[in-house]
Every structure is written in structure tokens, then in C-alpha cells.
Amino acid sequence: MADASDAPTPAPRAAAPRGRHRFLGNAVARTVLSIWAWFVLGLVIIIWTPLVFLVWLVTLPFDRGHYAAGYLFRKLCVAHQILNPLWTFRTTGTNIADPRRPYVVVANHQSFVDILLISHLPWEMKWLSKQHFFRFPLVGWMMRMAGDIRLVRGERDSVVQAMAACKDRLEKKTSVMIFPEGTRSRDGELKAFKDGAFRLAIENQVPILPLAVNGAYDAMVKGDWRFGVSDAEVRVLAPIMTEGLTLADLPSLRDRTHQVIADAVHDMRGMPRTTDTDGTA
């Protein structure tokens, strides 16, 4: 494949030392470290905002896709994770040789932390995000400068505009990141995929790039302001080509991608695959 090579995926990592989880998972330690992690997140956001603005301003005349500003914006997630002892993140899988080859990138959605984890990947993507994220002070400003794409759920006009914006980003040689489940899972398990990402890929004849996320569900404990102890991984899977596909092929493309991600998540958890699908293009 011209733009991606199958780099050997590291052998499944042994479970994090039980002592680390036992210590950090202690209620007192987790409370103290969560306060620290929230403080650090706020501090990093404050520091990052003028930096992203400066890069956006300097590159505006020649970087119409805001690739540089977006790339810097995502790296605040790396800085935060380094300073947050509750989390360890890693990226594995297929090596993407050309970061400017546009893909429609799709991933399973375990929790809000998926966004922070996927942002560790070494290339820029524009994210399809719910409107309320753009309303956040500083973060919303950086999302606009990065060229992320706003979506109002349930509004047809917003969906049409969002898909047009996604097409614009792809034409500017930048990948688009979409969670095809539509929302994060309530139990960490993979749900059915919606059609939008796959329609976008077929209509623009760009490959699907599947990502498998595991461990992020534990990093954000539902109903608790404190973070959880997590060893999370995002695995880049082989691209699935769409050249020559039509909308009649959409269901099979969607289902194939779902199966590829499901198999990868099972593998990351040390569980048997659900089918013999190999997930290659």
C-alpha cells in the first residue's frame, strides 16, 4: 500500500503492576491526583491557547486547512497525560507514511478520554464534534482555530453543513475523525455504527482508517468527578479502500469496519475474535 505500511504490532502488554493500580486506585490517592490532574488540564489549556492562536495567525496565509494549528492543539493532550500519573497511554498498529493522505478515520467510543488518547497519534485530523464543545471558553476557541467541525444533533441542516465541511477538509488533504456510534458507550462495549462516516468516505472516494480504543472507559468513571486509573491504548488498523465503491456498498463497508474494530478490541483485551475477519484492505 503506497501510503501505509503494516508495522509489527507489539505483543499484548502485560497488565499494569497490581501495586500501582492498588495504590493509585485508593480513594484518597485518586482524589488527590484527580484534583492535580484537573488543575494541570486547566493550566495546560490556558498556556496552549495563545500558542495555538500564534501558530494559526502565522500560518493563516498558506495553511488554509489549519493543519499546523490543529496539530499543536492536539498536543496539549500529550502534555496533560505526561503530568497525570493516573493514566498511561500508548499508540500501536499500522504506520501511516503520509500524514497528508486524507482518510475518514473512525473509532469506537468508550469515554470522553478517547479524544485525549487518539490525539496522541502523530498526525492531524479534524474532529466532527457536538456543538456544545465549541461553547467552552478557550477549548472552543482552539477548536475553531484548528478547523474542527460543528454538529447540532437532530438538525438536518446542521448535518448537511457538517458533511460539506468534512468534504472541504478532505479536499484540503486533512483527515476527518468521526465516532460512528454517534455517542460514547454507556458500558464500554461497541455499539452499532451509523452510516454518515461511510457515506462520506464513499462519496469522496477516500479510505476508511479504523482505530480501536481500549482502556479509556476506566479513565473517566461515570458519575464520578475523579479520574480512574487507566492503561489505555489506541491501535491504528489497516486502511479500508473505497475506490470504486458506490452507496449500494455502504452497508457492507460499515459492517466490515465494525467487525474489524470489534476484533481488534477483543484482541487488545486478550479475548477471542468474534469472527475470522482479518480487517485488511
Image (spheres, grey):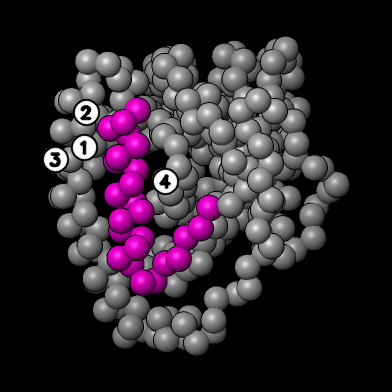
Q: Which residue type does callout 4 highlight?
A: Ser
Label 1 – label 2 distance at C-alpha: 6 Å
* Residue holding disc 3: 50
Q: Is residue 236 visible?
A: yes
Label 2 – label 4 distance at C-alpha: 18 Å
Q: Nearer the viewer, residue 200 or 191?
A: 200
**In percent of the image, x 15 and y 50: which residue is there?**
46
- Do the CB atoms of the residues marked 3 and 2 lie less than 8 Å apart? no
Q: Which residues are magenta?
A: 67-91
Quadrant (top left/top right/bottom left/bottom right) for the C terminus = top right
Examine the rendered structure and indicate whether residue 44 appears above or below residue 31.
above
**In percent of the image, x 23 and y 42: which residue is there?**
139
- Tell me residue 81's x, y (percent): 36, 60
* Residue holding disc 1: 52
- Do the CB atoms of the residues marked 1 and 2 lie less than 8 Å apart? yes
- Do the CB atoms of the residues marked 3 and 4 lie less than 8 Å apart? no
Label 3 – label 2 distance at C-alpha: 10 Å
Secondary structure category for the residue under label 4: loop
**In percent of the image, x 63 and y 68: which residue is there?**
13
Label 3 – label 4 distance at C-alpha: 19 Å
* Residue holding disc 2: 56
User: On the picture, is 64 further left or further right than 162?
Assistant: left
Estimate how packed mark 2 is, as few (under 14), some (14 to 19) or many (20 or more) residues with alpha carbons within 10 Å. many
Residue 220: assigned label? none
Secondary structure category for the residue under label 3: helix
Secondary structure category for the residue under label 2: helix
* Residue holding disc 4: 119
- Do the CB atoms of the residues marked 1 and 3 lie less than 8 Å apart? yes
Q: Which residue type does callout 2 highlight?
A: Trp
Secondary structure category for the residue under label 1: helix
- Do the CB atoms of the residues marked 4 and 1 lie less than 8 Å apart? no
Q: Which residue type does callout 1 highlight?
A: Val
